[in-house]
């Protein structure tokens, strides 16, 4: 019994070198991004984010790994959707692969009509997805909900810094800044990537410093 060997995918150096996002990366950041592209392509753009495993696999400290991932997210090169890795630049080729074309390569027309249509892709092209997301009303949480989730993940986070981060996202129309601003689609995932960079404080001292939050504790 023979098994079907899964083919690789075509790499386009020109796309890589002409990418504005890649231009902003240093050598270590490019290396991780390149590894993540392989992971995304081999897992249909739905690979689970496993920081501990990635840290050991790539020989990187968790703090360094988090820092690079956060930069890749801010540049719009990767997204974290429901704790899964999603890379927009991989999606177009994966759509072709899902519709039956090996390796995600565009086939040349044969001149003869196909006996059967290829069928619709399982997901819509990324461009259409982005247009639909822009039309949807942004679900911006209240600060209480935002704070409650942050404290659940990091009990000693500085609430002053947390409030400033929340206000900055609201002022920016619920978008992350940077060279390529992007909408915050999943605020919980985005907040999880941001929390490691917010200061920690003694909880009792902060309660005294911010009277109007006393009743919340």
Image (cartoon, grey):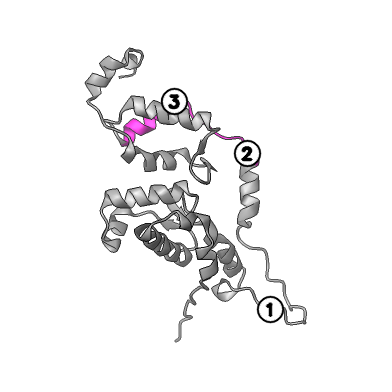
Q: Which residue is mark 3?
A: 143
Which of the marked residues, 3 or 2, is nearer the chain's N terminus?
Answer: 2
- Determine whether label 3 and label 2 are within 8 Å by CB: no
Labels in figure, total: 3
Q: Which residue is mark 2?
A: 136
Quarter of the image where the C terminus is located: top left
- Determine whether label 1 and label 2 are within 8 Å by CB: no
Residue 121, by quadrant, is: bottom right
From this viewpoint, which residue is outermost toward the bottom?
1
Secondary structure beneath label 2: loop
Quarter of the image where the N terminus is located: bottom left
Secondary structure beneath label 3: helix
Which of the two marks, 1 or 2, is nearer to us in this view?
1
Q: Position of residue 102 (x, y in %)?
A: 56, 75
Q: Which disc number belongs to residue 108?
A: 1
From this viewpoint, which residue is outermost toward the top?
211
Which of the marked residues, 1 or 2, is nearer the chain's N terminus?
Answer: 1
Instruction: Please name the residue shown 77% across and 82% down the image.
Output: 112
């Amino acid at each position: 019994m023979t098994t079907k060997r899964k083919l690789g995918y075509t790499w386009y150096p020109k796309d890589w070198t002409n990418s504005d996002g890649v231009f902003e990366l240093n050598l270590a950041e490019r290396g991780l991004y390149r590894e993540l592209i392989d992971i995304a392509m081999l897992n249909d753009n739905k690979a689970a984010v496993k920081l501990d495993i990635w840290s050991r696999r790539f020989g990187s400290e968790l703090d360094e790994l988090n820092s690079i991932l956060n930069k890749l997210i801010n540049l719009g090169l990767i997204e974290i959707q429901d704790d899964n890795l999603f890379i927009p630049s991989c999606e177009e080729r994966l759509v072709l692969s899902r519709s039956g074309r090996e390796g995600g390569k565009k086939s040349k027309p044969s001149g003869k009509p196909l006996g059967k249509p290829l069928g619709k892709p399982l997901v819509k092209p990324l461009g259409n997805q982005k247009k639909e997301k822009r039309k949807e009303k942004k679900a911006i949480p209240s600060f209480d909900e935002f704070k409650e989730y942050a404290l659940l993940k990091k009990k000693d986070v500085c609430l002053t810094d947390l409030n400033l981060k929340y206000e900055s996202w609201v002022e920016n129309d619920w978008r992350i800044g940077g060279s390529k601003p992007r909408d915050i689609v999943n605020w919980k995932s985005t907040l999880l990537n941001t929390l490691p960079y917010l200061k920690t404080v003694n909880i009792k001292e902060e309660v005294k410093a911010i009277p109007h939050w006393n009743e919340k504790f």
